[in-house]
Image: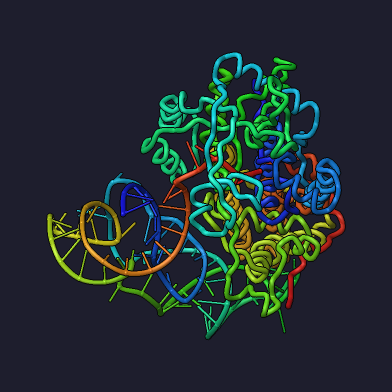
Amino acid sequence: MKDFYITTPIYYVNDKPHIGHAYTTVLADVIHRYNKLIGNNSFFLTGLDEHGLKVQQSADLKNISPQEHCDKMAPEFIKLWDKLGIQFTDFIRTTESRHIEVVQHILTKVNESGDIYFDEYEGLYSVSEERFITEKEFESGNFREVKKIKEKNYFFKMSKYQQKLIQAIKSDELKILPQTRKNEVLGFLENQELNDLCISRPKSRLNWGIEIPFDKDYVTYVWFDALINYISSIKFSKEEDFFYHRWPADIHLIGKDILTTHAVYWPTMLMSLGLPLPGSIFAHGWWLTDQEKMSKSLGNVINPLSLIDKYGPDSVRYFLMREMVLGQDANFSEELFIKRYNADLANDLGNLVSRVTKLISKFYDSKIPKFVNQDSILKEKYSNILLENRIKNFEIHTLLKEVTDFIQSINIFLEENVPWKQAKSDLELAGDTLYHSIEAIRVSTKILEPVMPRKCMEILQILSSEDLGLDWGSLQPETLIREQVVVFPRIVD
RNA sequence: GGCGGAGUAGCUCAGUUGGUUAGAGCAGCGGAAUCAUAAUCCGAAGGUCGUGAGUUCAAAUCUCUCCUCCGCUACCA
């Protein structure tokens, strides 16, 4: 069976990583880990986009070579991913030879198949920015020295695949999620004729790029180069078995700002190559901050990434996953973070762990008590969480809501059965209550583990059950509870 | 301008093909409990479901008017 294959965009090294990069990457990591949890082999690719004008300009400003600039930026990303516990399978940089070779191979192949032609391009050129600008950019009035100039370039026959692309999107052969993004792309494709894509830049103007293999005077347009990372990483054209064991990707995770490149350029490139299309493209929303509350003059601007140092990576991962509704924009503030953390992690889950483990220490000498009844309301509720479906539909947010609801029901279960009272008259009955409670905690933790790997491992270690799976009833009576620590200390202002 | 989305309790949002007193979490209020991280549980309160009209036995849910906000309208990366 083919591996599950998930990607993030490769991030442009012009910028230091910010919350948007972190969100996409955490989401990919979480989906990757969930797939492993349910028994799939999963391949998770992320990396860096290192060519193009802006990289060259950034390097020029610092008086270093573009490659040096990239080599300085790359560790910024890798360090952050390490901090956030990102377990990518491969990290690709577009300046690596393994990528460059594939890009050139593809250019050659597409050229030979007749999908590339040489033509004159006329556009609005900004002298100060050293690049062509769009009509929209021109209308914004932010560019002073704008000239209309002509330039010879190579074009990819994207328009040739317009109808085929519309068909693929309509039929969900290429699924674009969420639905509104699919509508957007279809509206765009059906209402106008697609133009061909200019895929080269003359070296006289820009030389930081991959040389066009059949014309030494040109380098490859950065998007044409960058998108190919999704297949160069997995050895397209080099190791067929390795490649087809992963391609097509199950999901390309992207921000909504790069929808067109992924939903139009990329699939048409694949069509030209005769490769299968990715299963889905998921465009997520953006993190917003309340303009009124976040202002420099008030001095209360917070860098979201600073929360990692302050409160730990796992709780940030949880917040990102829990707070953003699928595909929509979400608000970000430290206040929201603290509320969410205290409510779900400290008050509910963390406190519950203390509550139950301490009862077990007190009444059962720290050993998991025996159960009397096979079934309980908790076991039944657990069986209603359809983990696999949620993961297949990328409904991480809904899944987390279901798990927190389940955790709440453990607290209710305790209130109803009052094991601290039961224990005084009927140790066996109280033991049954506690077994079902602690097992419910264990499976909840297991489900949360892909989101909060380190913290959940701590809890599982307390229960001496790091190696147990998702099945209800795996926890064995007599298992020793280890020393309790406060896993999610409450945040007090 | 064109196409599309959204406007539901103080806040963040759920609300299947129209159908009993519109739901959840958080905040606030009252109470219970005291095993637990001043954590937990219960209860009440809180909404003319953006506006106006229409269709219907029945509309947050369908149709139309208007108001507000947002997205897309490519070949920047």
Picture layout, residue A216 above or below residue A450: above
Front in this rendered view, residue A16 or A209 = A209
Would you say A298 lies left or right of A168 here?
right
Residue at x-position 67% and y-position 79%: A297
Front in this rendered view, residue A94 or A456 = A94
Would you say A88 lies left or right of A130 here?
right
Residue A137 in percent (x, y) is at 53, 52
Residue B70 in percent (x, y) is at 46, 59
Residue at x-position 72% and y-position 58%: A315
Tell me the quarter of the picture where residue A99 sits.
top right
Residue at x-position 80% and y-position 31%: A96
Picture layout, residue A315 above or below residue A252: below
Residue A464 visible? The answer is: no
Residue A6 in percent (x, y) is at 65, 35
Front in this rendered view, residue A455 or A272 = A272
Residue A189 in percent (x, y) is at 41, 36
